[in-house]
Amino acid sequence: MSAHPTLPSELIACILDLAIPTLSFGTNSERTSLLKRLSLLSHDWLPFAQARLYTTILLQPAPDHFDEPDRSAQRLAATLAAHPELARLVQAIRFRKGRGKRGPSKVPAERLHMREILQHCGALAELSIVAVEGVELAWLGGQSSPRAYPPPMPSRNLTNVLPQAYDPLR
């Protein structure tokens, strides 16, 4: 028997979900700080906090230093490279330009270390890029050449690609 009693995993997950603010660019700093502190409570809490830290990543550079690489993006790229188990947790990344009035209208992708970050995120299901220039699809999942995506299908032809036995009302 363990010297310290442990909580059921469902209860740990529920406590974390109630303790942290809803994910947004406005709450990201507070949320990240709180999850880092909660991950130190116990080894049992660490995987739950890490999942919430890395499942959806929001990157917005500080508006003051537009000519310098973003330090938080640089740390994230290094962490994902050193810890593939954390990179596998990443399902969504949202990049956007900072809110400052100063600086260019778009941020170069190199400043956000997008290439390094995207190459490590093979399980990425969502990617949002706002006001960032110089992004290449080849960076996704470490691909050496751009991915070939089928052309978009007109919505009126959607019923033609569904199996004949498909009934949306069933």
Image (cartoon, helix red, strand yellow):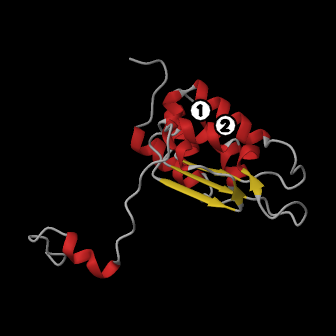
According to the picture, the residue beneath numbered tag 2 turns out to be 76
Q: Is 104 displayed left or right of 30 in the figure? A: right
Picture coordinates of residue 64 (x, y %)?
A: 90, 53
| Numbered mark located on residue 54 in the image | none
The residue nearer to you, when weighing 33 against 100, is 100
The quadrant in which the C terminus is found is bottom left
In the displayed structure, 167 sits above or below 147; it is below
Q: Is 67 displayed left or right of 12 in the figure? A: right
Q: Is 9 displayed left or right of 101 in the figure? A: left
Residue 84 visible in the shown view: yes
User: Disc 1 and disc 2: Cα gap in Å?
Assistant: 6 Å
Q: For mark 1, does the 10 Å Cα neighbourhood hold few (<14), some (14 to 19), or many (20 or more) residues?
A: many
Quadrant assignment, res 53? top right
According to the picture, the residue beneath numbered tag 1 turns out to be 80
Q: Is 155 displayed left or right of 46 in the figure? A: left
Question: Residue at the spot x=46%, y=27% of the render?
Answer: 5
Picture coordinates of residue 104 (x, y %)?
A: 85, 61
The residue nearer to you, when weighing 87 against 105, is 105
The residue nearer to you, when weighing 167 against 7, is 167
Question: Residue at the spot x=45%, y=30% of the render?
Answer: 6
Question: Residue at the spot x=71%, y=62% of the render?
Answer: 131
Picture coordinates of residue 22 (x, y %)?
A: 60, 59
Q: Secondary structure at mark 2?
A: helix
Residue 44 visible in the shown view: no
Picture coordinates of residue 55 (x, y %)?
A: 52, 46
Amino acid residing under circle 1: Leu
Quadrant assignment, res 78? top right
Amino acid residing under circle 2: Leu
